[in-house]
Amino acid sequence: MKILILCTGNSCRSQMAEGFLKSFDKKLEVYSAGTEPALKVHPKAIQVMAELGIDLSNNKPKSVAQFLNKSFDYVITVCGGAKESCPMFTGNVKHRIHIGFEDPAEAIGTDAEITTEFRKIRDEIKQRFNSFYLKNLINENKSF
């Protein structure tokens, strides 16, 4: 089962979603990418995922271009805000799904307030991707 998670910068939401899916099932091949990849994974994304035992510290943002010649069972976009347009993936895909989230990197306020926003989005991503996994992947993945 191959899954690609897309957003714009590949520094927060898609990285967290990739981390959660990999933690749910080690047999899944999960990748994330962005149309305009950031230089690094957001430090707050690394911090709040580490709080749940998921290490993103060695992850790097990747360009969607490096995946265009590959096929996927699922491509999932995670863009959420009206300011964003979700990237399109033109490669070979069985299922295209959108599971949108606001961008925690847009949060403003004190360090504590920004961390709280990252935790909120992290928890939303965990809940919605767990639901996606249970609904869509658990039965398909039993054949592996």
Image: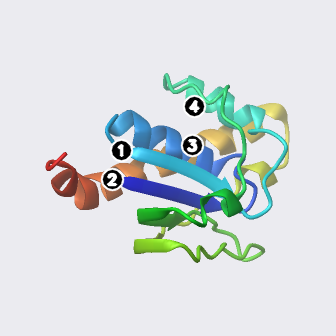
The amino acid type of the residue labelled 1 equals Leu
- C-beta proximity under 8 Å, tags 2 and 3: no
Sequence-earlier tag: 4 or 3: 3
Helix, strand or loop at mark 3: helix
Sequence-earlier tag: 2 or 3: 2
| Relative vertical location of residue 96 with respect to residue 37 in this rendering, above or below | below
Q: Which quarter shows the C terminus? A: top left
Q: Which residue does the image show at 78% across and 54% down from the upper left?
A: 37
Q: Which residue is mark 2?
A: 1
- C-beta proximity under 8 Å, tags 4 and 3: yes
Helix, strand or loop at mark 4: helix
Q: Say left or right for 107 vs 28.
A: right
Distance (Cα) linking label 1 and label 3:
15 Å
Q: Which residue is mark 3?
A: 16
The amino acid type of the residue labelled 3 equals Met
| Relative vertical location of residue 100 with respect to residue 48 in this rendering, above or below | below
Q: Nearer the viewer, mark 4 or mark 2?
A: 2
Sequence-earlier tag: 4 or 2: 2
Q: Which residue does the image show at 63% across and 68% down from the upper left?
A: 80
